[in-house]
Image (cartoon, helix red, strand yellow):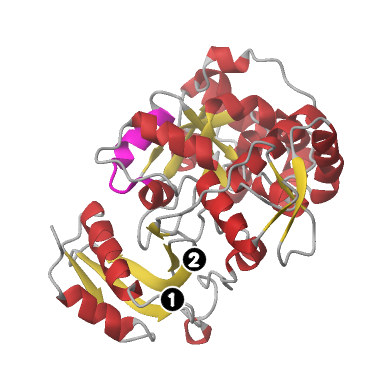
């Protein structure tokens, strides 16, 4: 394969992310494992206006499933672990050795947030005190550690900002891990009591070896991507990724190609297959791996997308929590969604149509919204009169759903 048309590239990307499979009637852990094989990770985010970010990629690909099953796989069965993958992420536990280079850098004060690095350098005693509390007293949230320190007879002066930062440093450097989450708050414990022994005993690969493996995994997840796309997937610096990508091409593990309209070379797995069709209908969370790299989203789908959570309300173009709507191999609409849990209503705050959207966009989106509402435990879908798709979507939702 020497080149891909843009339409072929889209189909390769969608297949790589698991969108070309039919949604199963019933989802079990095999489906969730397959989901992680496609995405490699699930990004975690605190915004809960619709549903937690780590749960929505599963909905987009599998349809209705038990989020409790995903939690069990992560925090009871230890099939997954939390760490900084793309951002804060859930990843298959066997990938943990591939991130030890990042942990080692964090321990050395390199590659972490500036405040965390300064803490490790200037307040090493505080870091060790926090670690000792977890080691000796068992798993705890940051708040529980703070309360325990205040109760201690030898109260060493808990400073919320300082000690919370110490916990984050210990997490980043791999000395502590997430045992579970309670109401989304991370419960910390020392790593040896969280991760399985068979993972901890795996030899640590060199940074170069880990980067090569992560870049191959990124290529598998992206389907097709530039060096910058592959590097961004696991937040490897592009200058560090380029020589590793060249080595992978030389070894035959990646192939360099061109994509129609892309100025930079792209990379695929040598055995990549271009699907003939992509019968897809999905809403995509802003943190979905398919679209989280906004420049790639624009190159791949000709869809300009920016999340506007941090934009003042009066300056937002499309809304606070906007999900693109994927139909076939195109992003054809976007909707600003909110779960009104008290009223048990999925609220469409705004709905916008793309210029190339097909005539049945409103009907297809209405079906997806009804199914999403049911999965979220909501009884109805209500559309506000904002956006050029809102009238047609309102009309489509008035038509009884087909059973």
Is 70 within the magenta? yes
| Residue located 52% across and 48% down the image | 275
- Please give left or right for residue 33 compared with residue 118 in the image: left
Is 135 within the magenta? no
Secondary structure predominantly adopted by residues drawn in magenta: helix
- Please give left or right for residue 132 compared with residue 194 in the image: right
Task: Name the secondary structure under disc 1.
Answer: loop
Q: Which residue is mark 2?
A: 330
Q: Which residue is mark 1?
A: 357
> 354 or 174, which is in the foreground?
354
Q: Is residue 300 above or below residue 143?
A: below
Q: Is residue 314 above or below residue 16?
A: below
| Residue located 60% across and 28% down the image | 95
Spatial separation of the CA atoms under disc 2 and disc 1: 8 Å
> 255 or 173, which is in the foreground?
255
Categorize mark 1 by other alpha carbons within 10 Å: few (<14), some (14-19), many (20+): some
Give the image quarter of residue 310: bottom right
In the rendered image, residue 401, in percent from the top left (x then y), is placed at: 15, 65
In the rendered image, residue 139, in percent from the top left (x then y), is placed at: 46, 28
> 353 or 306, which is in the foreground?
353
Give the image quarter of residue 151: top left
Image quarter hosting the C terminus: bottom left
Q: Earlier in the sequence, mark 2 or mark 1?
A: 2
| Residue located 39% across and 46% down the image | 58
- Please give left or right for residue 8 compared with residue 390 in the image: right
Q: Is residue 209 above or below residue 181?
A: above
Q: Mark 2 and 1 residues: CB-CB less than 8 Å, in contact? A: yes
Q: Is residue 165 above or below residue 209?
A: below
Q: Which residues are magenta?
A: 62-75
In the rendered image, residue 178, in percent from the top left (x then y), is placed at: 50, 33
């Amino acid at each position: 394969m020497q080149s891909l048309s843009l339409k072929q590239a889209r189909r390769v990307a969608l297949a790589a992310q698991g969108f070309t499979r039919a949604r199963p009637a019933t989802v079990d852990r095999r489906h969730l494992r397959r989901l992680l094989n496609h995405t490699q990770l699930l990004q975690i985010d605190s915004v809960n206006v619709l549903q937690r970010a780590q749960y929505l990629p599963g909905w987009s690909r599998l349809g209705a499933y038990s989020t409790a099953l995903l939690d069990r796989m992560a925090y009871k069965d230890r099939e997954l672990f939390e760490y900084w993958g793309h951002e804060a992420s859930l990843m298959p536990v066997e990938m943990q050795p591939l991130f030890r280079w990042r942990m080692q850098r964090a321990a050395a004060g390199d590659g972490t947030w500036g405040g965390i690095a300064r803490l490790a350098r200037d307040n090493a005693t505080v870091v060790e005190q926090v670690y000792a509390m977890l080691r000796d007293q068992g798993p705890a949230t940051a708040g529980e550690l703070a309360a325990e320190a205040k109760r201690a007879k030898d109260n060493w002066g808990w400073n919320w900002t300082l000690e919370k930062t110490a916990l984050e440093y210990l997490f980043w450097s791999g000395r502590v891990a997430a045992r579970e989450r309670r109401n989304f708050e991370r419960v910390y414990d020392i790593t040896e009591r969280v991760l399985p022994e068979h993972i901890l005993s795996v030899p640590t690969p060199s940074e170069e070896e880990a980067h090569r493996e992560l870049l191959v995994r990124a290529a598998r997840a992206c389907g097709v991507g530039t060096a910058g796309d592959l590097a961004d997937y696991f937040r490897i610096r592009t200058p560090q990724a380029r020589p590793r990508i060249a080595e992978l091409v030389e070894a035959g593990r990646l192939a360099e190609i061109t994509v129609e309209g892309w100025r930079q070379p792209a990379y695929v797995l040598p055995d990549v297959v271009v699907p003939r069709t992509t019968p897809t209908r999905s809403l995509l969370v802003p943190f979905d791996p398919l679209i989280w790299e906004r420049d790639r989203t624009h190159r791949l789908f000709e869809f300009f997308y920016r999340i506007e959570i941090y934009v003042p309300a009066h300056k937002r173009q499309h809304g606070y929590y906007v999900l693109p709507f994927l139909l076939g191999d195109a992003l054809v609409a976007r909707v600003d969604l909110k779960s009104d849990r008290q009223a048990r209503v999925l609220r469409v705050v705004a709905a916008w149509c793309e210029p190339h959207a097909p005539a049945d966009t409103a009907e297809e989106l209405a079906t997806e919204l009804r199914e999403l509402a049911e999965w979220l435990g909501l009884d109805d879908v209500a559309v506000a009169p904002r956006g050029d798709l809102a009238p047609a979507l309102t009309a489509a939702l008035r038509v009884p759903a087909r059973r």
